[in-house]
Every structure is written in C-alpha cells, then in structure tokens.
Amino acid sequence: MATAYEAADGNGACLYGPSADMMIAAMNHTDYESSRACGAYVLVRAANGASITVRIVNECPLPCAPGQLDLSQQAFAKLADLKVGRLPITWSLLSPAAAPATLSVRYKTGSSRYWCGIQVIGHRNPVAALAVRTAGGWRQLPRTDYNYFLAADGNGCGSSIRITDIYGEQLTVDGLAVRPDVAQPTRVQFARH
C-alpha cells in the first residue's frame, strides 16, 4: 500500500537534508529497521502499470503497516491522482545505475576527536555497517535511529572509515578530516547488484 505525504524540502528522519529530487519516500517502521533503510532506492509498481524509483529518506510511523510506503506527493502523483489517497503497490529494492558517481561522508554537528557521529550519503546500496580504524584494528560503530554511526569515546574519529553495504561489499575511505556538517566527497561507490 502507498500513501502520500507533504515532504516539504525532502528532509526526513534519515537527516540527509533537503532533497534536490523529490522522488522520495518514507519507509514503514518495520522495514525502516532503525534507519537501516535510509538511502535505499526502491522500485514502486502500481496495479495500473505505472512505476517510479524513489529513495528512502524518512520513516513512516505507525499506523504505517509493514510493506507500506508513504510517498512524497510528487512521487505519488506519478502513479495516481493524489485524491486516490491509498494505492495498492508492490516495491522492491534497487541497486540503480543512476546513483551518484561517488558517495560522501558527513560528520555530525558537534563531532571532534573526542566524540563523533558519521553518516554516509549518496550510496547506491543500503549501508549495513560502518567501522573506523583504531590502534587496535577496525572498530564497528553502532548505528543510531537517526542514521549516524557513533564513536562515543572518539576512538577512530578522523581515521580511515570502512563502509559495508547489505551485499557485503566493503569500501575504505581515507584522509577525511573531522569537519562537522560538511558532506565530504570520496572516490568510491558501491557496485551494482
């Protein structure tokens, strides 16, 4: 089932900021999995044969049912008239060719070498894990429900970052300074699956 919501500038629970492309959606609480769905590309098909690709940027709280998507009004309008209200759909995860050429990394506002939150932006495939290099090796960071990976004690902040997608591909990013609230481009992107 799909519903529509007023997405304003496209920012949502994933905290990516305003969206240049309003082909976005909010994932139901169950499939959102505490922000694991953030940034995922989803192919949405309506029973009338229309289809669109949207990017998950928000969470649709209860009463959104498992499997339900709350599409931006702009995305919903590509499938049916907004007056329809609720539209039967099916959706599936995509690994699109049209993803950004490289992903970016952003440190959360307030980050320093003593505490940092790290967010991945513009990834082709959903991010499953993020680790930072420490003197003792790679340290996997816990993910928050607001889509940042936290190093609460600062260990690993400003060092190499290893990002793993849901297919197990690992990308390593070196040389990024702790610059809070700046999307720093990298030279890497996940492969298509």
Image: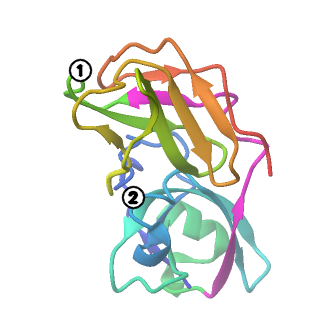
Quarter residue 102 falls in: top right
Give the position of the N terminus as an image quadrant. Answer: bottom right
The one nearer the camera, 42 or 72, is 42
Q: Crowding near pointer 1: few (<14 within 10 Å), some, many (20+)?
A: some
Q: Residue drawn 36% across and 43% down? A: 148
Residue 112 circle label: 1
Residue 77 location, quadrant: bottom right
Provide the secondary structure element on which disc 1 rests: loop
Q: Is residue 4 magenta?
A: no
Magenta span includes 103: yes
Range of the magenta residues?
Answer: 88-106
Q: Percent from the top left, x then y, of residue 23? A: 57, 55
Above/below status of 65 relative to 161: below
Residue at mark 2: 7
Q: Amino acid at mark 2?
A: Ala
Tell me what residue is drawn at x 65 percent, y 19 percent: 187
Scheme of colours in the image: rainbow
Task: Give me the residue at 80% from left, 79% from top.
Answer: 49
Q: Position of residue 53 (x, y in %)?
A: 68, 59
Q: Amino acid at mark 1?
A: Ser
**Residue 87 percent across, percent down from the top left:** 58, 85
Q: Secondary structure at mark 2?
A: loop
Residue at 43% x, 18% y is 159
